[in-house]
Image (spheres, rainbow, N blue to C red):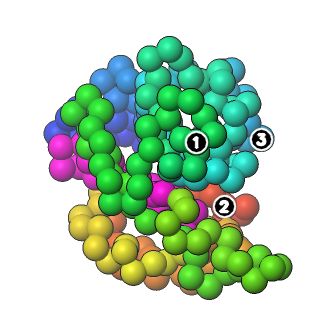
Amino acid sequence: MAKFVTPLGKIDVTIIGHASVLIEWNGLKIMTDPYSEIADYTKQPVADLILITHDHYDHFDINALKPVTGKSTTILSTPVVAGLLPDVKPLKQGEGSTYEGLHITATFAYNIEHKNENGMLFHPRGAGNGYLLDFGGFRLYFAGDTELIPEMRELGPIDVAFLPKNLPFTMSDDMFVEAVNVIKPHNVCPYHFFHLDVE
């Protein structure tokens, strides 16, 4: 768990696994991409706010969502996910939403290089979101399933960046390092990885 002080209060950040992260803030629980293959979500708290990046099974997982979704839970995701699950507020890339004073912006997340066996990009531009969470000027960036993309140069100051590192779906080691150098976050947290080389 990592702890940070923001203008809107202290936040505790826990990486549950894969692309799932829990942020505890002023008594509220914010969760990204619950995924039942990496954790037992019946043992996780009910979330006040859930952010889903896209409709792939390891990000949009009904079995993980059910135990952490309550009557007052707000869920933000892409228009595709909003069409699959009731009561989801859709956000397109560039659109924003506010929750209890926290400003959330959907960002682009997509592949440029890596394609599946049919020659299609694993994550085409416009299909998935990243999310920028602005706690009164303290900014967390959840990149989603993405490679290094031009839009990363336009993010502005980032205090904590969560960046994916797994081939062939997201970034290679070298691309990950280049993305860090482009974004220049004060803190970086690799997530969505199969393994990490720590040499």
Between marks 2 and 1, how big is the CA–CA gap?
Answer: 28 Å
User: What residue did someone put label 2 on?
Assistant: 193
- The amino acid at mark 3 is Glu
Q: Position of residue 79 (x, y in %)?
A: 51, 49
Residue shown at the point (44%, 38%) measured from the top left: 89
Residue 73 counted in the magenta span: no
User: What residue did someone put label 3 on?
Assistant: 37
Residue shown at the point (28%, 73%) measured from the top left: 154
Res 27 quadrant in image: top left
Mark 2 vs 3, N-terminal side = 3
Res 147 quadrant in image: bottom right
The residue closer to the viewer here, 27 or 83, is 83
**Above or below, comparing residue 123 to residue 77 in the picture:** below
Residue shown at the point (38%, 24%) measured from the top left: 28
Instruction: Residue lying at the far right in this picture: please name it.
Output: 117
- The amino acid at mark 1 is Gly
Q: Residues within 10 Å of mark 2 (few under 14, many from 20)?
A: some
Res 81 quadrant in image: top right
Is there any visible trace of residue 129 in the rendered image? yes
- The amino acid at mark 2 is Phe
Q: Position of residue 86 (x, y in %)?
A: 56, 30
User: Which mark lies nearer to you, 2 or 1?
Assistant: 1
**Above or below, comparing residue 153 to residue 26 in the picture:** below
Start and end of the magenta stretch? Answer: 129-146
The residue closer to the viewer here, 6 or 89, is 89
User: What residue did someone put label 1 on?
Assistant: 83
Q: Position of residue 35 (x, y in %)?
A: 68, 40
Q: Secondary structure at mark 1?
A: helix
Residue 141 counted in the magenta span: yes
Q: Position of residue 94 (x, y in %)?
A: 33, 60
